C-alpha cells in the first residue's frame, strides 16, 4: 500500500464502491432520484479525497443537431475554450 501511495486497503475501497452502488440504486427509487436531485455522496470519493466530483461533472444537452452545431461554433469562435 505504501509503495502505491494508498491510504486504505483494497478491500475497504471495494466495500465503499459496493456501498455507493447500493446507495445510488436506492436513491433512484426516491422522488429526488427520479428528478435527479440531491444524489448521495460517494463514500469511495470521500475516502480517496475526491469529495467535490459532483460539481465538476456538468453536462449540456441539446434538443437538436442544429442547437449542438450552434453551440459548437460559438465555442470554436472563442478559441475552443468553454467558459
Image (spheres, rainbow, N blue to C red):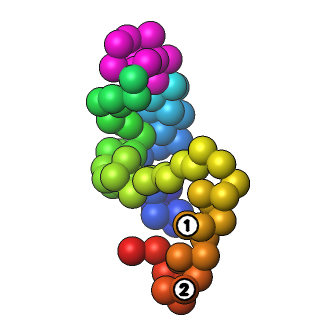
Majority secondary structure in the magenta region: helix
Image point 48% across, 39% down: which residue? 13
Q: Helix, strand or loop at disc 1?
A: helix
Nearer to us in this view, 40 or 4:
40
Q: Does residue 31 show up magenta in the picture?
A: yes
Considering only vertical position in the picture, is 37 above or below 61?
above
Question: Exactly how many numbered labels are in the figure?
Answer: 2
Which of these two is toward me, 8 or 67?
A: 67
Q: Quadrant of residue 83?
A: bottom left
Answer above or below: position of 30 versus 55: above
Left or right: 7 in relation to 73: left
Residue at far bottom of view = 79
Q: Residues within 10 Å of mark 1 (few under 14, many from 20)?
A: some
SS at circle 2: helix
Q: Residue 23 versus residue 58: which sits nearer the camera?
A: 58
- Is any part of residue 23 visible from this angle? no
User: Marks 2 and 1: in contact by CB < 8 Å?
Assistant: no
Q: Quadrant of residue 29?
A: top left
Q: On the picture, is 48 further left or further right than 66? A: left
Work out how far the residue at label 1 is from the one at label 2, CA to CA, in angstroms: 10 Å
* Magenta extent: 23-34
Which residue is rendered at x = 58% and y = 82% of the image?
Answer: 76
Q: What residue lies at 54% left-to-right and 48% top-to-bottom? A: 61
x and y, in percent, of residue 10 in the image? 53, 42
Q: Which residue is mark 1?
A: 71
Residue at the limit of the structure toward the front, as seen here: 66
Q: Which mark is residue 77?
A: 2
Amino acid at each position: 500500500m505504501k509503495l502505491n501511495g494508498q491510504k486504505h486497503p483494497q478491500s475497504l475501497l471495494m466495500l465503499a464502491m459496493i456501498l455507493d452502488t447500493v446507495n445510488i440504486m436506492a436513491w433512484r427509487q426516491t422522488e429526488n432520484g427520479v428528478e435527479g436531485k440531491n444524489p448521495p455522496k460517494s463514500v469511495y470519493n470521500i475516502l480517496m479525497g475526491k469529495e467535490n466530483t459532483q460539481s465538476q461533472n456538468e453536462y449540456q444537452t441539446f434538443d437538436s443537431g442544429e442547437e449542438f452545431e450552434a453551440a459548437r461554433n460559438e465555442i470554436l469562435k472563442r478559441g475552443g475554450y468553454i467558459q
